[in-house]
């Protein structure tokens, strides 16, 4: 269906002069307050009239099965409806038709647009609110939408929309991943004395990397232990085989015990290894200069840079060279642990001995599969920093469900923006079925 629509605006301009800024402000207010929403409502009224007329003329042409074998429609009434959109509140009165034979009512325009029965907002406005709220608090997001975008959405309404949205639901990850990376961070939770909940909440996150290098979200949980997280990850895969070739994480004891069975080998994060050595030595009164010297020495020992080369292109002699480098580094770490023990730094010595076996898994993984696993969780730490900024610094008093939902929204946006765009393209049904052409403005 095609329509030609004329725009009629009354413009009263002072003869003595006015500012360009005032003209622009008044024009924007006119179209944001009435023009754009009224234009959409007019188009919908025209579509409503055309669809109803076609259904009455062609009784059985409505999508889906007819209401009865002898369906015969007649005009019933008009119902006032309004929808919140990013261009304003669209108000219209759509027609309802009633079958004379069985008495069932039909709303042709609602069925034509694919709207739900009690829908009161557009999906594109839900996307705008979701993206703004994921960057700042509900209060600031509400004020930002009203002042900058001229979209009045109260913070309580925005919160309800976020709780109801399904955009945080991730696609199921593949059954086999090259790398599984996990980490956790705290957030300020709403305490509940009756349920035994303190104000300290924990967010646990797992991301995967495919053999092609694509990052895929695996899960985000609150109010769970690492054992429960491992069980939740396991339910996403079939059989009992490991989910990933290499698990990359820090040295948290509970994490390592709970999740190492999900991967064939475990890679200890080098950054955390160097960072935590300082704390271990500090607890036993090691001087600052010695702590820094030992950190630099440890960083030099464990740093083995490998090229991104396919396994088939690595000769056997070269593989032997890399294995010898690993053995040499392990011996030097053993010597460092012995020196710590001799000086009375028992915590640091035990820390080095326990971590040595998992510091060079990335080299073994590369020699076996040709896939370069990360030595650190820095790429995951950047994501956790963004999650911490939203959950810790911007707001507090989260519920476990609310914190997990906001984390899933952020992870989906930040890990794969193209997939986020594709989700909303499908959700908004942007299929090239609407075309608007501006033919110019003229004085009548």
Image (cartoon, grey):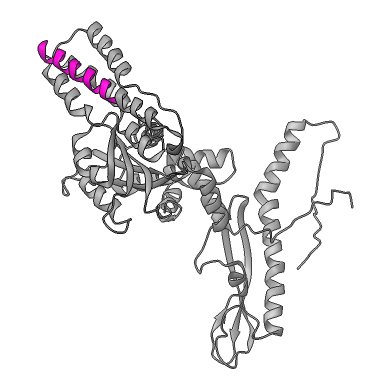
Q: Nearer the viewer, residue 250 or 262?
A: 262
Residue at x 65%, y 49% (from the top left corner):
33
Q: Nearer the viewer, residue 214 or 75?
A: 214
Residue at x 78%, y 65% (from the top left corner):
2
Task: Decide whether residue 332 is among the magenta residues.
Answer: yes
Q: For the stretch drawn in magenta, what is the main secondary structure?
A: helix
Residue at x 55%, y 81% (from the top left corner):
105
Res. 53 image quadrant: bottom right
Residues shaded magenta: 326-344
Task: Decide whether residue 426 is among the magenta residues.
Answer: no
Residue 292 point in image, percent of width and height: 27, 11
Q: Is residue 40 above or below residue 278?
A: below
Residue 406 point in image, percent of width and height: 39, 45
State whether residue 344 appears in this view. no
Residue 184 point in image, percent of width and height: 29, 37
Q: Nearer the viewer, residue 60 or 280?
A: 280
């Amino acid at each position: 269906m095609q329509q030609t629509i004329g725009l009629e605006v009354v413009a009263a301009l002072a003869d003595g002069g006015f500012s360009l800024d005032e003209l622009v402000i008044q024009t924007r207010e006119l179209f944001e307050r009435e023009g754009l929403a009224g234009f959409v409502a007019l188009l919908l009224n025209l579509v409503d009239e055309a669809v109803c007329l076609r259904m009455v003329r062609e009784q059985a042409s409505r999508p889906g099965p007819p209401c009865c074998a002898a369906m015969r429609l007649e005009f019933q009434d008009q119902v006032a409806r309004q929808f919140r959109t990013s261009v304003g509140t669209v108000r219209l009165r759509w027609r309802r038709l009633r079958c004379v034979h069985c008495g069932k009512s039909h709303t042709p325009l609602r069925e034509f647009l694919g709207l739900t029965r009690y829908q009161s907002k557009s999906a594109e406005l839900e996307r705008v609110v979701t993206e703004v709220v994921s960057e700042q608090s509900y209060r600031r997001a509400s004020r930002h939408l009203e002042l900058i975008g001229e979209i009045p959405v109260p913070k309580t309404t925005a919160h309800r929309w976020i709780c109801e949205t399904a955009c945080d639901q991730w696609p199921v990850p593949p059954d086999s991943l090259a790398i599984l990376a996990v980490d956790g961070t705290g957030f300020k939770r709403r305490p509940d004395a009756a349920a035994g909940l303190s104000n300290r909440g924990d967010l646990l996150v797992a991301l995967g990397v495919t053999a092609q290098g694509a990052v895929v979200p695996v899960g985000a949980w609150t109010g769970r232990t690492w054992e429960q997280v491992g069980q939740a990850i396991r339910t996403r895969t079939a059989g009992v085989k490991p989910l990933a070739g290499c698990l990359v994480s820090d040295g948290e004891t509970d994490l390592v015990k709970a999740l190492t069975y999900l991967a064939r080998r475990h890679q200890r994060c080098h950054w955390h290894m160097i960072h935590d050595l300082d704390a271990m030595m500090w607890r036993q009164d090691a001087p600052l200069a010695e702590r820094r010297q030992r950190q630099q020495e440890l960083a030099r020992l464990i740093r083995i840079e490998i090229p991104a080369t396919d396994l088939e292109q690595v000769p056997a002699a070269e593989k032997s060279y890399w294995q010898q480098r690993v053995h040499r580094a392990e011996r030097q770490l053993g010597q460092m642990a012995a020196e710590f023990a001799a000086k009375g730094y028992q915590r640091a010595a035990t820390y080095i001995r326990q971590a040595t076996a998992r510091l060079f898994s990335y080299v073994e993984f590369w020699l076996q599969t040709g896939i370069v696993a990360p030595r650190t969780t820095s790429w995951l730490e950047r994501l956790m920093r963004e999650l911490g900024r939203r959950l810790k610094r911007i707001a507090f008093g989260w519920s476990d469900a609310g914190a997990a939902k906001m984390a899933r929204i952020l992870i989906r946006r930040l890990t794969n923006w193209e997939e986020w765009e594709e989700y909303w393209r499908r959700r908004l049904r942007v299929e090239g079925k609407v075309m608007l052409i501006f033919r110019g403005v003229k004085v009548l």
